Image (cartoon, rainbow, N blue to C red):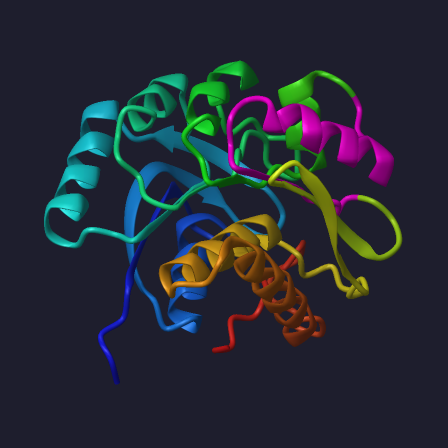
Amino acid sequence: MRQPPVALTIAGSDSGGGAGIQADLKTFAAHRVFGTSVVTALTAQNTSGVLGVHATPLHFVALQLEAVQSDLPPVAVKTGMLASPEVIAYLATRDLPHLVVDPVMVASTGKPLFTGAAEAYRELFARALVVTPNLPETRELLDRDVTTVEDMAAAAVELAKLGPRCVVVKGGHLAGDAVDVVWHGGQLSYLRAARVGTPNNHGTGCTFAAAVTAHLALGSSLPAALRAAKTYVTRALAGSADWRLGSGHGPLSWKEI
């Protein structure tokens, strides 16, 4: 087996194992990418909700990042839950290659996972290769409702003005087929897949962003990485569709590609 490339996730820990650092590392491993991590927060959560959040102090976030970069330099980096504007401001000063920003701000149950205003993400967006907000996150970032595919397209164009090379507005919260809108190189395109009917969708956004990061680490082009990540998430949802792990929204499967 050839030596695997290194990817880094900078995100919160999910004690239930379905999202956050845990989902990211499982996704990296499924793609045969060596995963490293910087933990920005501990969350007490399960499939039913978030019971509490304990943010990592900024100095220790910085120490973790220094430890990884000095010994295991990643070729692609993904951010998830960053917990505070101070952490975002710090990361915006760092060299983070092939940066995928998933702007996690609120849990699906409504629990806040970020202490600042959405505007804090703007500086990090300007350094990102791709940003991957879902519809609630897009609403927070633009301060308006996004309820149709046409709204998503307009939102992607507006978010692109903040400086990322690519924007993916994820449409999993809409009814019908799972449609994501992609802005890249001044053009709009769409990632489409049949919706998988399952309540086991906890960590879908984390998994998508982590799969994009893994494919970038493996040397894929950005368009190819996006397509492959969409396929991987659809397979992961189908693979756990009948699981009964927990009493709420269960996790995705993580079979190797």
Q: Position of residue 40 (x, y in %)?
A: 34, 35
Q: Position of residue 50 (x, y in %)?
A: 54, 39
Span of residues in magenta: 145-173
Q: From this viewpoint, is residue 127 visible?
A: yes
Tell me what residue is drawn at x 62 percent, y 22 percent: 141
In the visual, does 54 lie left or right of 46?
left
Q: Is residue 75 above or below residue 115?
A: below
Tell me what residue is drawn at x 26 percent, y 52 percent: 74
Q: Position of residue 37 (x, y in %)?
A: 29, 49
Pick whichever, 161 or 10, lies toward us.
161
In the visual, does 18 lie left or right of 135?
left
Q: Where on the picture, by quarter, is residue 227?
A: bottom right
Badge count: 0
Seen as rendered, the residue at the extreme bottom is: 1
Q: Where on the picture, by quarter, is residue 118?
A: top right
Pick whichever, 249 or 2, lies toward us.
2
Q: From this viewpoint, is residue 148 visible?
A: no
Quarter that holds the N terminus: bottom left
Q: Is residue 247 above or below residue 102?
A: below
In the visual, does 48 lie left or right of 129?
right
Q: Position of residue 106 (x, y in %)?
A: 59, 31
Q: Is residue 121 above or below residue 9?
A: above
Does the segment drawn in magenta span residue 9? no
Tell me what residue is drawn at x 42 percent, y 26 percent: 124
In the visual, does 50 lie left or right of 66?
right
